[in-house]
Image: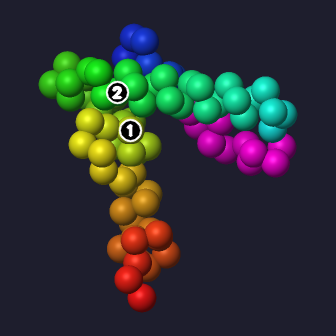
């Protein structure tokens, strides 16, 4: 369960699962605004004040206070499939 004032995990998953090519311009704009708002809320709230589930959700989406990649991007980079590969 997400913390008060944060985008729900269900909404985040739904926005991620549907390709942009299948979204209307309004849906894409809404996803963008919601994502930026949630990122701002994440940055404004110290990790020490976040619930355990919110910290986990932020870590999975890369939306944490440390400006670090998401766990998915870290995994891609580790196997050479991400943007940070030095091949």
In this view of the protein, which residue sits in the foreground, 39 or 18?
Answer: 39
In this view of the protein, which residue sits in the foreground, 45 or 71?
Answer: 45
Residue located at (67% from left, 44% from top):
17
Taking 24 as reference, is 4 left or right? left
Mark 1 or mark 2, which is nearer the start of the sequence? 2
Taking 46 as reference, is 53 left or right? right
Q: CA distance from mark 2 to mark 1?
A: 7 Å
Q: How far across and how far down the image is residue 8, in percent? A: 51, 23
Q: How far across and how far down the image is residue 73, in percent? A: 43, 60
Give above or below for 82 relative to 59.
below
Q: Secondary structure at mark 2?
A: helix
Q: Which residue is mark 2?
A: 42
Q: Quadrant of the C terminus?
A: bottom left
Q: Which residue is mark 1?
A: 63
Main secondary structure found in the magenta portion: helix
Q: How far across and how far down the image is residue 53, in percent? A: 33, 29
Q: Is residue 1 visible?
A: no
- The span picked out in magenta is 12-22
């Amino acid at each position: 369960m997400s913390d008060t004032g944060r985008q729900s995990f269900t909404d985040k998953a739904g926005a991620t699962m549907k390709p942009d090519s299948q979204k209307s311009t309004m849906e894409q704009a809404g996803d963008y605004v919601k994502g930026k708002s949630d990122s701002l809320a994440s940055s404004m709230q110290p990790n020490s004040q976040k619930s355990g589930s919110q910290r986990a959700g932020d870590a999975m989406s890369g939306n944490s206070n440390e400006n670090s990649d998401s766990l998915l991007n870290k995994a891609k980079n580790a196997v050479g499939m991400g943007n940070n590969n030095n091949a």
